[in-house]
Amino acid sequence: NGTYYPAVGARDRSFCLDCSRGTYQPAPGMSACRMCEPGNYSASMGSTSCDPCPLGGYCPLSGASSVAIAFTPCPVGTYNDKRGSSHENECTPCPVGTSNSLQGQSSSDVCAVCPPGTHAGTSGSYICTACGNGFYQPVAGASSCMLCPSGSWCSGGHAFECAPNSYGDVSIPVELRTSQHACKSCGPNSATNGSGHDSAAACDCNPSFYRCNVSSSTC
C-alpha cells in the first residue's frame, strides 16, 4: 500500500515506487497512484490515504501536496467548522445581526453580536454598521435601525429624550434631529411634566399663570 509499479515483471517489493506527494494508493499491487481529490491533500511520500482539508477554510485543488498549497481560508463574515471542504460555498455566513472581521475561522463563536447603536442587515457581514443620522437601535443583534422617535434626538445610534421643560420640534426633518437643538424650550412661565414630549401642548402654565388664548403658547 502507498506504492505502485508502472511496468510488469517486478521480482520483489524493492521494485515498488512510493506514491508522490499529492497522491495515494490504498491497495497493493497497483500500477498507478490516485490523485487526492479536492477537499484533501497529501504531504507525505507513500501515502495510503489523503488528509482532509483543515477547519476554517476549503481546499479547491486536486493533487495538493501540502496544506499551504491546498488551503484557502474562508472569507471574512463566514466560518467553517467542517473538515474536508472543497469550495467556498461550504463556508457558513454569520447570521444577520452579527459580524466577523477575520478570515479562516472555524467556529460560529467568532460571529460577534452587533452592539446597540449598530446593525448588520445581511448574513455574512464583516462589520456592524452604525445607525445613520435620525435612526437608533436600543438592542444588540439587530438587523436594522429604527426611526428616531418623536420627542427625542438621536446620535451615534442612540436616542435621547428631549429634556424636561422642552419638546421635540417636528418641523425639523428626522435626519437632522441629531442634537438637543432638535428640542424647543417651553415658553416663559411654563413647564412639562417629565421628558420626551413631542408637542408644545405638553408645556403647562405654572401656578398663577394661564393662557389668554387657547391657541397661544404664552402663559
Image (cartoon, grey):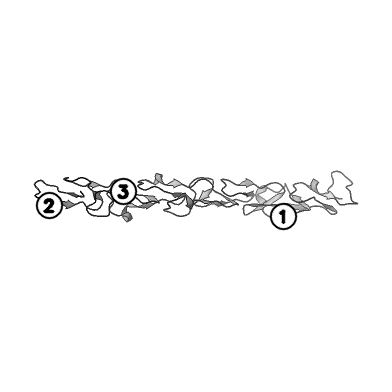
Which mark is first along the chain, 1 or 2?
Answer: 2
Mark in front: 3 vs 1: 3
Disc 2 target residue: 15
Residue 32 image offset from top left, x and y in percent: 18, 46
Disc 1 target residue: 181
Asked whether the residues under the numbered discs 2 and 1 touch, taking CB atoms below 8 Å apart as contact, a structural biologist would say no
Mark in front: 3 vs 2: 2
Amino acid at dot 3 = Asn
Q: Is residue 41 left or right of residue 7?
A: right
Give the number of the disc on residue 102: none
Circle 1 residues within 10 Å: few <14, some 14–19, many ≥20:
some
- Using the numbered discs, state the Cα–Cα distance from disc 3 to disc 1 in whole angstroms: 62 Å
Residue 18 image offset from top left, x and y in percent: 19, 52
Residue in the foreground of this view, choosing between 205 and 95: 95
Amino acid at dot 2 = Phe
- Using the numbered discs, state the Cα–Cα distance from disc 3 to disc 2 in whole angstroms: 28 Å
Give the residue furthest to the right: 208
Which mark is first along the chain, 1 or 3?
Answer: 3
Q: Secondary structure at mark 2?
A: helix
Q: Is residue 1 left or right of residue 172?
A: left
Residue in the foreground of this view, choosing between 16 and 164: 16
Residue 169 image offset from top left, x and y in percent: 73, 49
Circle 3 residues within 10 Å: few <14, some 14–19, many ≥20:
many
Circle 2 residues within 10 Å: few <14, some 14–19, many ≥20:
some
Which mark is first along the chain, 2 or 3?
Answer: 2
Amino acid at dot 1 = His
- Using the numbered discs, state the Cα–Cα distance from disc 2 to disc 1 in whole angstroms: 89 Å
Disc 3 target residue: 40
Q: Secondary structure at mark 3?
A: strand
Q: Secondary structure at mark 1?
A: helix
Task: Tell me what residue is drawn at x 85 percent, y 54 percent.
Answer: 189
